Amino acid sequence: MAKTSALRGIVLLAIGTMLIVPASTQSSSPTGDPSLDAYIDSIRADLRSDKISVITETMQFNDKDAAVFWPVYKKYEAEQTKLNDERIQVIKNYADHWITLTDVDAKKLAEKSLDLES
């Protein structure tokens, strides 16, 4: 469980960094760049692949256990992907509006982020 939380934290930090760094170096909207979305998708795919490799190597499932585990894991991963998509949208929204962000908007973003964490 701690490893999952740590991995999730690293992923969120990496995604946040990718979005904030371009924001500080560009005058236009950082999230309007399709190459940024492609880059995020590429990193996410690499991380998913790495996670599967680590799980496979660590757990060393026999065929029976693998047949039970992987469908459950794929469902879990799909749910996590949806949550992470929403988290990325919150980060992008912040990156697009951080200069003009009102207290009300900041509170909404913070609440959305906390809701997703729950």
Image (cartoon, rainbow, N blue to C red):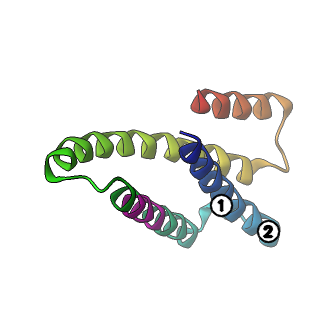
Mark 1 vs mark 2: give the one in front.
Answer: 1
Picture coordinates of residue 94, whole percent (x, y): 72, 47
Taking the spot 25% from the left edge, 52% from the top edge, the residue there is 61
Q: Foreground residue, 2 or 10?
A: 2
- Look at the picture and state if 4 lies above or below 58: above
Picture coordinates of residue 54, whole percent (x, y): 42, 61
Q: Which residue is mark 1?
A: 14
Q: Main secondary structure of the magenta part?
A: helix
Q: Along the horizontal axis of the image, is 10 left or right of 100?
A: left
Taking the spot 71% from the left edge, 53% from the top edge, the residue there is 96
N-terminal label among 1 and 2: 1
Crowding around mark 1 (Cα neighbors within 10 Å: few <14, some 14 to 19, many 20+) is some
Residue 48 shown in magenta = yes
Residue 2 shown in magenta = no
Q: Which residue is mark 2?
A: 27
Disc sitting over residue 103 in the figure: none
Q: Amino acid at mark 2?
A: Ser
What range of the chain is rendered magenta? 46-54
Task: Measure how far apart labels 1 and 2 are at the Cα level.
Answer: 22 Å
Q: Amino acid at mark 1?
A: Ala
**Secondary structure beneath label 2:** loop
Taking the spot 80% from the left edge, 49% from the top edge, the residue there is 98
Q: Foreground residue, 64 or 76?
A: 64
